[in-house]
Amino acid sequence: MMIRTVRYADMELESPVAIVGFPSSGLVSSIAANYYVSQLKMKVVAGISGSDLPPYCFIYEGSAYPPIRIYGHKAKEKRGKKGKDVVVCLSEYAPKPDQCYEVAHEIMDYLRSIGTEEIVCLEGVPRMSQDDKMSACGSGPSAAEMIKKGRLPRMESGMVRGTTGVMLYDGPLAGFSVISIMVPGNQSIPDPGSAAEVMGPMSKIVPGLKVGTSMLLKEAEEINKRLTAPEQPVDDSPFYG
């Protein structure tokens, strides 16, 4: 597969933490990643396209970009403390299994070029019961500390697939610390409520990364109302008007 990265802007970010969100159960990771982009008013800094990737573009602020985009955010200083710069990598499609290796390495090549050392991959996983909780796994020098900061239980065994899986085993070889946050979500419909849950741990893992969740929670409430609303009776009368 021919794959390439196009650079659109240089924001002079300092060791930015990368957040990666591709579609997963309940679109939790995609919703969360897009929410950060919109709430922080992030700018597109790079895009990734390839011969085997979907042939579509995404329009953002009036400009066309490839299916995989990377957005940048320069942290502001608040009360004498400066947060961490952030980049968010996202897409509306999930790479096929035979694309994951190249896509993951193309992303990591770009992240290494801008000085990224830490990667947080967001993953929605099927919710089996209401008791299911978030968990995390990781690899690399600071992965354990990142998970500890997020106050997340550590997954000791299991399987992580897709680009996240590739980054977990190959990221440390490229100099990254990589963690994956697994967020239980609804398998059949978009789940903004579960996406909101990840914002708390993320604010602890990435200094200065704080966004309100009211919009996500309101959207979740509206979806729940539609799902629980009683069906309207069907009028079988042949007369109209």
Image (tube, grey):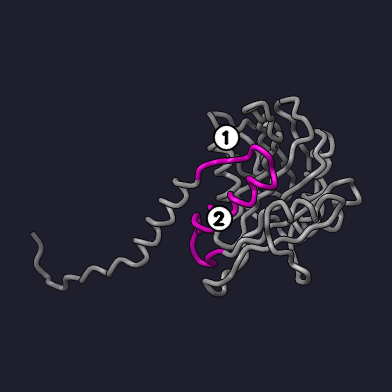
Residue 97 coordinates in the image, percent (x, y): 75, 61
Residue type for callout 1:
Leu
102 to the left or right of 190: right
Residue 176 coordinates in the image, percent (x, y): 84, 47
How packed mark 2 is, by other alpha carbons closer than 10 Å (few <14, some 14-19, many 20 or more), is some
Position of the C terminus by quadrant: bottom left
Residue 137 coordinates in the image, percent (x, y): 76, 61
SS for tag 2? helix
How packed mark 1 is, by other alpha carbons closer than 10 Å (few <14, some 14-19, many 20 or more), is some
Q: Which residues are magenta?
A: 185-212
Task: Using the image, tell me which numbered label, if any, was put on residue 151.
Answer: none
Q: For residue 208, which quarter of the picture?
A: top right
Q: Nearer the viewer, residue 67 or 9?
A: 9
In percent of the image, x 66 and y 36: which residue is there?
71
In percent of the image, x 71 and y 51: which residue is there?
149
User: Which residue carries the number 1 mark?
Assistant: 40
73 to the left or right of 224: right
Q: For residue 144, which quarter of the picture?
A: bottom right
65 to the left or right of 226: right
Q: For residue 98, which quarter of the picture?
A: bottom right
Q: Confirm whether the magenta stretch covers residue 209.
A: yes
User: Which residue carries the number 2 mark?
Assistant: 197
Q: Which numbered disc, 1 or 2, marks the residue that appears first in the sequence?
A: 1
Residue type for callout 2:
Glu
In percent of the image, x 87 and y 51: which residue is there?
141
Above or below, 199 relative to 63: below
Q: Nearer the viewer, residue 117 or 241?
A: 117
* Outermost residue to the front: 79
SS for tag 1? loop
